[in-house]
Amino acid sequence: MDQILRQIRYELQQARFLAEQQAAERLRLALNNEAYREADAEVSRCMIAAARAEAMGEAGDKEEAAYQRALKHRTAVAKKYRISEQSFAPQYGCPLCNDTGYTEDGKICPCVRREYYRRFNLSCGLSPLGLADFSQCDPSVYAANEQEAAALRIKRLKDYAENYPNVKEINLLLYGKTGTGKTFLAECVASEMIQKGYTVLYLSSHSLNQLFLRYINERNTTLFERITQADFLVIDDLGSETIIKNITCELLQAALNTRMQTNKPFIITTNYDGLKLREHYGEKLFSRIASNKTQFLQFTGADLRIKRKKT
């Protein structure tokens, strides 16, 4: 089993045990109150009497009425002594799986998947908690003649993030010169997807290359599955990595193929335009990147990083 997943499952077991232990302790403390303890015992007696009547085939109206009265009395006692009966139920961290890691239909809970990819991103030196978000977007950082175009780019990407999965083109290719905001806005989209509950794998092209090498050297299929199974794959600065013969292009093509087959989107940022991408990676890989499911968005303007250094 994957070490990250094993650790998450262990922590969930511990959290579930702790929640149930704390709930039991809250009940124990409540039962130290004599009035509440007696009221609770009466509820138990009436419940058993009602169940016995039902099992015997009797009407049980009298017993049911007594049970309901006992419940109301216990609630009144709890209110009088400021005892929260709701606190007797375990307070699990995830209400969807109750910290079991699995939903009612037996599938891995989204909380596990999100935490899995958060930790994997951390292991790659990238923290989703440090990603930019749309609240930080400010077209005024661009030159006056570039602000309108910048505002339109922000709007298109914000609309994509808000409307996904109901979008025509699920993939994004953000291209243009260095320092024009491609990485920043890719992070904004990724951050929005994390907030919506999707798993995001955010990698620089160099980190992706290293992951491919590990996959080949360690023969660890889990590494490749991480790339293909994340809800969103973000590849930052494609084209800056060293092309490793028989690895980089071939495995990237295979990964994008698999994602296309399962309708899982990707976001790519690059300094290359379409022509240079085709020249650099070849027709086969380019056709996967530039399919009819990919929205191209060009970034123009001066290098903002140089501008910031000057100001």
Image: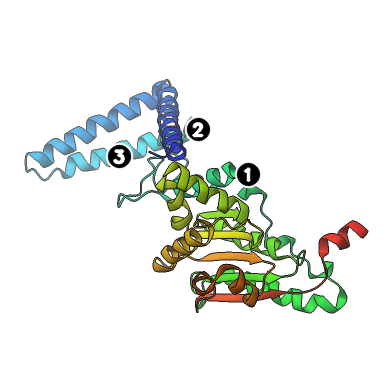
- Which residue is nearer to you in this view: 4 or 197? 4
Amino acid at the residue labelled 3:
Arg
* Residue 311 seen anywhere in this rendered image of the structure: no
The location of residue 269, given as percent across then percent down, is 64, 65
Q: Secondary structure at mark 2?
A: loop
- Which residue is nearer to you in this view: 38 or 309? 309
The residues tagged by marks 2 and 1 sit, at their Cα atoms, a distance apart of 49 Å
Which is more foreground, mark 3 or mark 2? 2
| Circle 3 residue | 69
The N terminus appears in which quarter of the rendering? Answer: top left
| Circle 2 residue | 82
- Give the label on residue 125, or none: 1
The location of residue 160, given as percent across then percent down, is 58, 71
Describe residue 11's horizontal placement relative to residue 61 as left or right: right
Q: Are marks 3 and 2 in contact (CB under 8 Å)?
A: no
* Residue 80 seen anywhere in this rendered image of the structure: yes
Amino acid at the residue labelled 2:
Arg
Residue at position x 69%, y 75% from top?
A: 298
